[in-house]
Amino acid sequence: MQVFGLLGNPVGHSLSPPMHEAGYDELGLDARYVTFEPDRDDLGSAIEGADSLGISGLNVTIPFKEEALDYVEPDDLAVRIGAVNTIDFSGDGDSLPTGHNTDAGGVRRSFAHHDVTLAGKDAVVVGAGGAARAVGFALADAGAEVHVANRTVERAEQLADDLSGATAGGLESLETRVSDADVLVNATSVGMEEDASPVPADALHADLAVLDAVYRPLETRLLREAGERGATTIDGAWMLLYQGVEAFERWTGRDAPVSAMNRALRARL
């Protein structure tokens, strides 16, 4: 039996186990997905121990995504984003496990699932933290022109510099930028704890595709207001699903049963 899992602290809320195990069951794979919650100072030992125990792959979540770079051989995308969320132990055993970031792929595949192309589009990213970095690189690498808006302008400018050619501004830039944009992504937690939106409703329009990284609730105020104006709306569960799909396919070498994984995920939301 192969064992895969999730490293984080805390991980009790994670929806990854039912999602991945639904995929294993659908394909008849002898595999299980478990969670691990090491102390915050023990990430290196946890990864080394997982390797020694023959675990096949790990996802990595808060607060370990950035630190995990130090304990793996990261690919180029993980280095550019500055975070690892997937570890693969399938190497020859004489080198470090490889580290990857499937969050960016999760963003691109979420838009593709909703028939939204990104190449040549004007995109606005709200936020400049870890999620926004994955979103920004996903959009830029797909050929979109990216504007980063954040409460702290300096952080927006840093991310824009890393994206090479992106622009940046404060939250006050959203009304003008979103009005002219094709794509909008909320990569902040606004809308999770309260019925609030980071984007002025008047800026939303029917020619916009809106992805909100928040998945609890599935319909945030941003998505509700965007839908009322005729925009294409994409809830955060799609991004969660497709980052898991990319990890699943990397580990197993099989096409993920997306529908089965999606049903298992949404049954718990």
Image: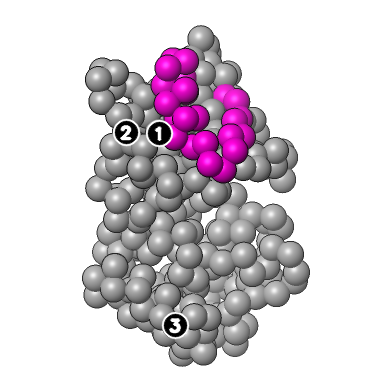
Instruction: Bin the neighbour count of mark 2 within 10 Å (Cα to Cα): few under 14, some 14-19, many 20 and up.
Output: some
Which one is in front, 263 or 253? Answer: 253
For the residues marked 1 and 3, what is the alpha-carbon distance in whole angstroms? 33 Å
Label for residue 87?
Answer: 1
- The alpha-carbon separation of the residues under discs 1 and 2 comes to 6 Å
**Which residue occupies 36% across, 54% down?**
82
Residue type indicated by callout 3: Val
Of helix, strand and loop, which one carries label 2? strand
Q: Quadrant of residue 132?
A: bottom left
- Report if the CB atoms under discs 1 and 2 are less than 8 Å apart: yes
Residue 14's spot in the image, x, y percent? 65, 40
Instruction: Identify the residue position indicated by label 3 in the image.
Output: 153
Residue at numbered disc 2:
98
Query: In the displayed structure, does residue 134 sit left or right of residue 237?
Result: left
Count how many numbered circles sit on residues in the image.
3
In magenta, the rendered stretch is 33-56
